[in-house]
Image (cartoon, rainbow, N blue to C red):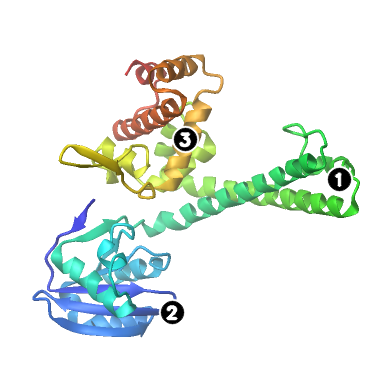
Amino acid sequence: MRFYTRQRQYYCGIDLHTRWMYVCILSRDGEIVYHKNLPAGPEPLLEAIAPFREDLVIGAECTFTWYWLADLCAREGIEFVLGHALYMRAIHGAKVKNDRIDSRKIAALLRGGTFPLAYVYPREMRATRDLLRRRTRLVRHRAELLAHIQNTAAQYNLPPFGDHEVCPKNGPEIIQYFDDPAVQRSIGTDLELIDYLDGTIAYLESQIERAARGHDPQALMLLRTVKGIGKILGLVILYEMHTIERFETVGQFCSYARLVRSPHESAGKRSGRSRNKIGNQHLKWAFSEAATLFLRGNPEGMAYKKRLEKKYGKPKAMAILSHRLGRAVYFMLKRNRAFDMNTFLAN
């Protein structure tokens, strides 16, 4: 966990919402010099901080509304820091909680050097990352539609469809597979949505690939040398990490990707593990998928997995494989080298 420890003359804590924001500014001595609820927007904020902006830092909790605030501070040359929502226990654990108190506590955390930092993702890649996340949601929705068709067949005790039989081009045959007109209409709706999503997903992928060529094509090329990491997983890893240079050690990268366990220890005794929601869920998914695809058509990889299974069991073996792929990606990008299977299996 990293904290903001720089000394400033003024510390501004903002409890940010969609339409309103509560702004609290503390002096270096801890005196409240400004504390007011304002409409959420650039003009009210700039007017409020005008007397203090010479030596000011602004902090806000990492909620979905922080984009415009970070961009405003970057444009105006004001230091901005983002607070890690899950680490800000001083706010979430309070007996009394409201916007006025929360803004005061954010400013106090900044002043006291205990403000837990989250990463402020840069503007130039942020929109493409969000588009990629949107594409992932659409793919999962498409999978739900396919599952609904298969589940409906099971409801009526009909033989299941093959892996490649459920597609819009086979729509008439699939619809006639069911007798009830209402069920036919339901299945027809699923097929229509799948057909629409196919075109939308293909278009989004082309746009994301085009944007990636202007961001970091070298990193994307290196990622795709890893067996199991293709076009989409490479894009997910690239855009979720932004740049490997933000991670000083391989441990930091693997922790951020949720590839390691974080046990709680005291006096030599373990008391469970830390919260598993801390880290990047998209990187966790990408490396889990990469571990599965790594084994496909890879006899050497399968032999390595079997050795891990004998020692740790099947579930833990896959977790170890995901972790090792994460470590491999880190060192590949740090050293600007392509993936080497012999080196991966030797260590």
Q: Are circles 3 and 2 on residues that touch, CB within 8 Å? A: no
Q: Residue at x 49, y 50 (%)?
A: 211
Q: Residue furthest left?
A: 29
Q: CA distance from mark 3 to mark 2?
A: 38 Å
- Mark 2, secondary structure of its residue: loop
Q: CA distance from mark 2 to mark 1?
A: 47 Å
Circle 2 crowding by C-alpha within 10 Å: few under 14, some 14–19, many from 20:
few
Q: Which residue is mark 2?
A: 19
Quarter of the image where the C terminus is located: top left
Q: Nearer the viewer, residue 112 or 225?
A: 112
Q: Amino acid at mark 3?
A: Ser
**Which numbered marker is on residue 150?**
none
Q: Which residue is mark 3?
A: 288
Q: Which residue is mark 1?
A: 175
- Give the percent coordinates (x, y) of residue 160: 77, 34
Q: Is residue 78 above or below residue 343?
A: below
Q: Is residue 172 left or right of residue 139?
A: right
Q: Is residue 290 above or below residue 275?
A: above
